[in-house]
Amino acid sequence: MTTVEPIDAINYPAARGGCPFAPPPAYQEALEQRPVTPVSLWDGSRAWLVTRHEDVRSVMGDRRFSADARHPGFPFLSDGRRELAAQNPSFIRMDDPEHARFRRMLTGDFIIKRVEALRPEIQRIVDDFLDRMTAHHPPADLVAEFALPVPSLVICRLLGVPYQDHDYFQERSRILLHNHSTTEQVRQARDELALYVMELADRKEWEPDDRIISRLVARGDLTREQVATMSLLLLVAGHETTANMTALSTLALLRDPVQLARLREDPTLIKGAVEEMLRFLSIVQTGTVRVAVETAEIGGTTIEPGEGVVCMLSTANRDGAVFAAPDELDLGRDARRHVAFGFGVHQCLGQPLARLELQIALETLIRRLPELRLAVPVEELRFRTDTVVYGVEELPVAW
Ligand code: HEM
């Protein structure tokens, strides 16, 4: 055990630097110099930033660290987030056995075999949105016309949510995921979304189907609020993440002609390429937080009960102890040890779906549009730095 010297805490979240794909320089410095480092949060409170691959897995895989935001000391990113966690938390903010009880109700829907059966449908959806995008003259915004609608339609179909309502829930889920949304905005967005899903659940009582919401209702052991909370978790997690990964991966490929050519020449690389892009881009930039409920030692630092911990997936995924030349995008490397989907009991439930969507979307995009290119200088792109999920606001492309 090392004694902690009183040093200045870095601000969390920290600003990103020049490279749009790299984690904030302050976190990268921490990875090299002080892998478990104190950070100062928006309200002046302190937490620990854990940056190494090994340490991130230790925290996320250890029951002495709780994901339950009702514990004192839980590190919130804003008042709005505190509000969100306080009311009807979803199982991402619960510990076992409570967490496992809810998660088990959904695991069957996301096992690889079930998800693989969706391949033809996802391919049709991908082709369909690409047809629509290319039906008009370039340029087009790849985010609005392709990256967002594909996962959005897929998750709507799985849940049994009418896709024509997507504007309504996309606007509100953006508010939930934005770091600077006020408490009032968060409360309103959350209440409106919950009401929307509860009304939908009521309808499923009389007009059942074989989709997730209907099946949760039919169980009979969940309250309407519980059905709404679980469905909203899937709805929000299910499209923002994959959408941002699709757009950002496309940008990363367009910025790296050698890697793009490699993938075009050998499309069988796509599975590994998606893993490498998950590692390289690590889009979940905030939110993977825990609070210690027992004393624990991580990377030589003692963390006491009630102290918050921020697990930095992006630096863990660029830890040179695990990945050689970690700052290079190398579509041929074996990146499967990445933690872009988290680690431990909360590891992403939707990862088989996210993987399949990304593989199909990116493979189809580069196959069908061999001349795909950015339609604006990269300096003009606006990046989503103040949200849980990193990405690009718009991606104007030509083909
Ligand atoms: C590229 C896309 C995605 C990324 C990078 C991603 C990342 C993550 C991460 C890092 C976590 C762990 C959070 C934590 O431990 O605090 C997580 C959890 C979760 N994700 Fe994803 N996700 C993606 C796509 C999806 C999709 C498509 C769905 C649903 C259809 C989904 C549903 C969930 C759920 C329900 C949890 C909570 C699991 C639990 O607490 O047991 N995710 N995701």
Image: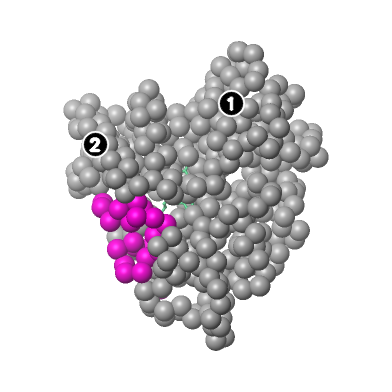
**Colour scheme employed for the rendering of this structure:** one colour
Label 2 beta carbon within 8 A of ligand 1 = no
* Image position, residue 366 (x, y; %): 69, 29
In which quarter of the view is residue 134 placed? top right
Tell me which amino acid carries mark 1: Asp
- Please indicate whether residue 226 sits to the left or right of residue 81 in the image: left
- Asked if residue 112 lies in the magenta stretch, the reply is no
- Picture residue at 37% right of the left edge, 65% below the top: 74
* Picture mark count: 2
Residue 89 makes an appearance in the image = no
Residue 86 makes an appearance in the image = yes
Tell me which amino acid carries mark 2: Leu
- Picture residue at 31% right of the left edge, 39% below the top: 189
Task: Mark 2 vs mark 1: give the one in front.
Answer: 1
- Please indicate whether residue 271 sits to the left or right of residue 303 in the image: right
- The part of the chain drawn in magenta is 64-91
* Residue under pointer 2: 195
CA–CA distance between discs 2 and 1? 31 Å
